[in-house]
Image (tube, rainbow, N blue to C red):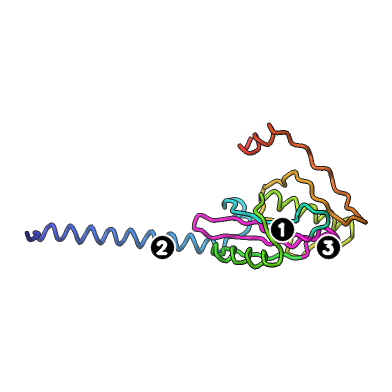
């Protein structure tokens, strides 16, 4: 049964409208992705969700040399990661790398590359921040200086607070002056997990 000219015209208009909507959606996604790639760290910290963060498996051992990743993810799938090399023995953050607006695969490739040298494990962003603060305390005690890009990279944490974990700095012969971790009861951990 042949279609009438009117129904053919309606079908063409409907297809044209769908095509226009698809183009506009793709354009918005592309613009959002470009904005994500060029986002300053303050905007990343304020608006992006935390993704999986990583630290060397031996992060809790005295004087460890720790590699740590703080990773945030954008709704478009873009990731921004700050990668730290922390010396808990002599003190300081001795290396800082940034992957800004990266594809998730780029971050994963970097995790795999670093895991080849030193196994990594998933940790809370607060653990990464606690490790950085412990490294900085040890640097002050030993008179060493942190990496020149540390202040910029720390912006990725925004208003994140460090976890209350025991991090042992120094060596067995020269232990660091580490503050005792604050004990946190079960009730406080439950409340914190719900944002209270």
Task: Check if residue 71 falls in the magenta segment.
Answer: yes
Label 2 crowding class (10 Å Cα cut-off): few <14, some 14-19, many 20+?
few
Dot 2 or dot 3, earlier in sequence: 2
Q: Marks 1 and 2, Cα distance to the nearest angstrom?
A: 40 Å
Residue 56 is tagged as: 1
Labelled pair 1, 3 in contact (Cβ < 8 Å): no
Q: Which residue lies at the image location 85% right of the left edge and 55% below the top edge?
A: 138
Q: CA distance from mark 2 to mark 3?
A: 46 Å
Which quadrant holds residue 83? bottom right
- Quick one: which residue is furthest to the top in this view? 187
Reply above or below: 133 against 8. Answer: above
- Asked whether residue 156 is in view, the answer is no
In the image, taking residue 183 as reference, residue 49 lies left or right, namely left
Q: Is residue 76 left or right of residue 142?
A: left
Whether label 2 touches label 3, CB < 8 Å:
no
Q: Residues within 10 Å of mark 1 (few under 14, many from 20)?
A: many
Q: Earlier in the sequence, mark 1 or mark 3?
A: 1
Residue pointed to by mark 2:
27
Q: Position of residue 67 (x, y in %)?
A: 72, 61
**Mark 3: secondary structure:** loop
Question: Along the polypeptide, which appears first: circle 1 or circle 2?
Answer: 2
Residue bounds of the magenta highlight: 65-94
The disc label shown at residue 145, or none:
3
Dominant SS of magenta comes to: strand
Label 3 Cα crowd, 10 Å radius (few <14 / some 14-19 / many 20+): some
């Amino acid at each position: 049964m042949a279609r009438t000219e009117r129904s053919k015209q309606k079908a063409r208009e409907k297809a044209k409208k769908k095509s226009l909507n698809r183009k506009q959606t793709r354009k918005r996604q592309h613009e959002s992705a470009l904005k994500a790639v060029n986002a300053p760290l303050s905007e990343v910290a304020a608006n992006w969700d935390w993704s999986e963060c990583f630290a060397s498996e031996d992060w809790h051992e005295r004087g460890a040399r720790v590699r740590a990743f703080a990773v945030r993810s954008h709704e478009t799938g873009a990731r921004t990661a700050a990668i730290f090399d922390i010396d808990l023995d002599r003190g300081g953050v001795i290396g800082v790398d940034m992957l800004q607006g990266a594809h998730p695969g780029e971050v994963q490739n970097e995790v795999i590359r670093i895991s080849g040298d030193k196994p990594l494990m998933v940790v809370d962003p607060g653990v990464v921040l606690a490790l950085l603060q412990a490294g900085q305390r040890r640097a002050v005690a030993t008179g060493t200086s942190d990496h020149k890009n540390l202040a910029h990279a720390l912006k990725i944490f925004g208003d994140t607070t460090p976890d209350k974990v025991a991090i042992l700095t120094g060596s067995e012969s020269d232990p660091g002056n580490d503050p005792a971790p604050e004990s946190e009861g079960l009730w406080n951990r439950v409340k914190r997990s719900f944002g209270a």
